[in-house]
Image: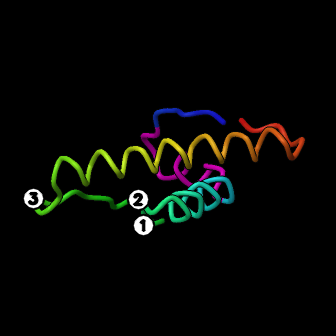
Amino acid sequence: MCIRDSCRYRDVMDNDWPLFHRFCAACLRHGVYLHTMWHHGISTAHSDADIDRALEGIEAAFRDTLAESSSDGKERT
């Protein structure tokens, strides 16, 4: 998996969408809903504890997604 700067629409469309959707599903399993179309936001209604909990869930989902990607034998870029 590679994180790169994208400055063109074509660059964004070249992302590994199945991997991104697996990450979003993992986030949901950890109690964090991410909209799959890039527009995320935090409102003033979110407390520091809410944000901390979301970050914990996102980190756990990231670890799960990396482990899943490593175990399926497919190389990710």
Nearest to N terminus: mark 3 or mark 1: 1
Instruction: Indicate which disc residue 38 carries.
Output: 2
Rendered image quadrant of residue 71: top right
Q: Is residue 10 left or right of residue 64?
A: left
Q: Residue at the location (46% across, 45% down)?
A: 8
Q: Residue at the location (34% across, 61% down)?
A: 39
11 and 4: which is toward the camera:
4
Q: Is residue 70 above or below residue 25?
A: above
Q: Which residues are magenta?
A: 6-17
Q: CA distance from mark 1 to mark 2?
A: 6 Å
Q: Is residue 28 above or below residue 77?
A: below
Q: CA distance from mark 2 to mark 3?
A: 20 Å
User: In the displayed image of the protein, which residue is found farthest to the right?
Assistant: 73
Instruction: Indicate which disc residue 44 carries.
Output: 3
Q: Specify the amino acid type for callout 3.
A: Thr
Are there few (<14), some (14-19), or many (20+) residues within 10 Å of tag 1? few
Q: Specify the amino acid type for callout 2.
A: Trp
Quadrant in the picture for the N terminus: top right
Is label 2 in a helix, a strand or a loop? loop
Nearest to N terminus: mark 2 or mark 3: 2
User: Mark 1–mark 2 contact, CB under 8 Å?
Assistant: yes
Is label 3 in a helix, a strand or a loop? loop
Q: CA distance from mark 3 to mark 1?
A: 18 Å
User: Mark 2–mark 3 contact, CB under 8 Å?
Assistant: no
Quadrant in the picture for the C terminus: top right
Q: Residue at the location (76% across, 44% down)?
A: 69
Q: Which residue is mark 1?
A: 35
Are there few (<14), some (14-19), or many (20+) residues within 10 Å of tag 3? few
Instruction: Indicate which disc residue 17 carries.
Output: none
Rendered image quadrant of residue 34: bottom left
User: In the displayed image of the protein, which residue is found farthest to the left?
Assistant: 44
